[in-house]
Image (cartoon, rainbow, N blue to C red):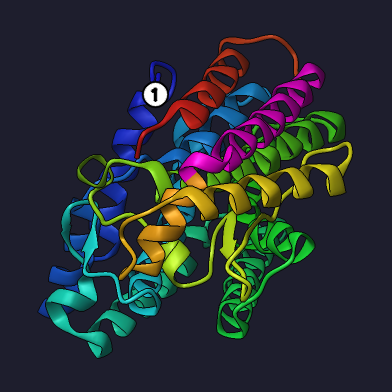
Amino acid sequence: MDVTLTREGLQAIDELLLSTIDSEVDLLNQASRHIIASGGKHLRPHVALLSYLAAGGDDLMEAVSMATAIEMVHTATLVHDDINDHALLRRGRPSVHARWGRTFALLTGDYMFAKVYTLMAPYGATYNVIMARACSELVEGETMQAVAAKAGTIDRETYKRIVELKTASLFTGAARMGALLGGGDERVVEALATYAFNLGIAFQMVDDILDVVGDPEAMGKPIGTDLAQGRGTFVAQPNGKAILTLQPAGDVSATTAAVAEAVAVAEATTGGEEDDPVARMMAKLRTSGAIELARLQALEMIDRACAALNDVPPSAARDELLSLTNDVINRDH
């Protein structure tokens, strides 16, 4: 990820994250610093900073507290997600709940969420409403996902809405706040928000693909966990088939049928791993052509993100936003 334009801002975000989570309660200090120290892509705050610059902003430090708030929200959700997912590893390190237990992990995530108020305090009501909406949608998406996973089924439209809410909402909020703060007009603000929305969906789709074909060492966690819990692009249905739940524009039914047929063939020919249904399903997905179809859909979202930038004036920041799409589609963790 090229951070030439935003290096100073991203460094300031790291410093502000650590100073903001400082607490007289030592355990909150330790647990918060633990998850922050595990590293991260800082993709969402990077989008916020680049959107600020692309919209005409000329003092990057003006956007740092807002961008830090975006990263704080994301980090807090990781703490809570690991509880819900029973995940023992996060970026190659023990998750907060694995090290300190469920109760303290919940409190750590809550503490980090509360600190978002401090970070957003310098901004007006408009920005705080955007942040509140992004956070609300994120929780709605996570809840929809949990309900669908518990039911054991998920359809394409439900999956699409889950991704829009739980992932794209924070990307969109980051870009919208950055663009507004940078002084962009309505057309530029909406263009950058549309860019971020599609980038966020592509990011989640790649995440779901990596859950099936990724390298556990590079990802810092086991693969197959989302599939095992009924989440992600590929969903094991009661009849043992798999469907691709987010379809590209075009003949949706034909694409779904093609995937189902490919998986059915793989199901008839794939042997081994009979004692592990998740491993069996992953093997079928790898040989069914579903991965390739999902990647094509992610590429379509990337194309939409790039097209949205046509309404943004040419600049080095816009170029970096375009470059960011390559990082998202080609990432391996």
Q: Is residue 118 visible?
A: no
Quadrant for the C terminus in the image: top left
- Seen in the picture, residue 74 relative to 194 is either above or below; the reply is below
Q: Main secondary structure of the magenta part?
A: helix
User: Label 1: how many residues lie within 10 Å, few (<14), some (14-19) or many (20+)?
Assistant: some
Mark 1 residue element? loop
- Seen in the picture, residue 184 relative to 68 is either above or below; the reply is above
**Residue 65, position as x, y percentages in the image:** 45, 49
In the rendered structure, which segment of residues is drawn in magenta?
286-311
Does the magenta run of residues contain 305? yes
Splitting the image into 4 quarters, where does residue 22 fall? bottom left
**Residue 305, position as x, y percentages in the image:** 70, 29
Q: Nearer the viewer, residue 228 or 254?
A: 254
- Seen in the picture, residue 316 relative to 223 is either above or below; the reply is above
Q: Residue at x 42, y 69 (%)?
A: 228
Splitting the image into 4 quarters, where does residue 163 fall? bottom right
Q: In the image, is 322 to the left or to the right of 281?
A: right
**Residue 213, position as x, y percentages in the image:** 39, 42
Q: Nearer the viewer, residue 215 or 66?
A: 215
Q: Is residue 278 visible?
A: yes
Splitting the image into 4 quarters, where does residue 89 fall? bottom left
Q: Which residue is mark 1?
A: 1
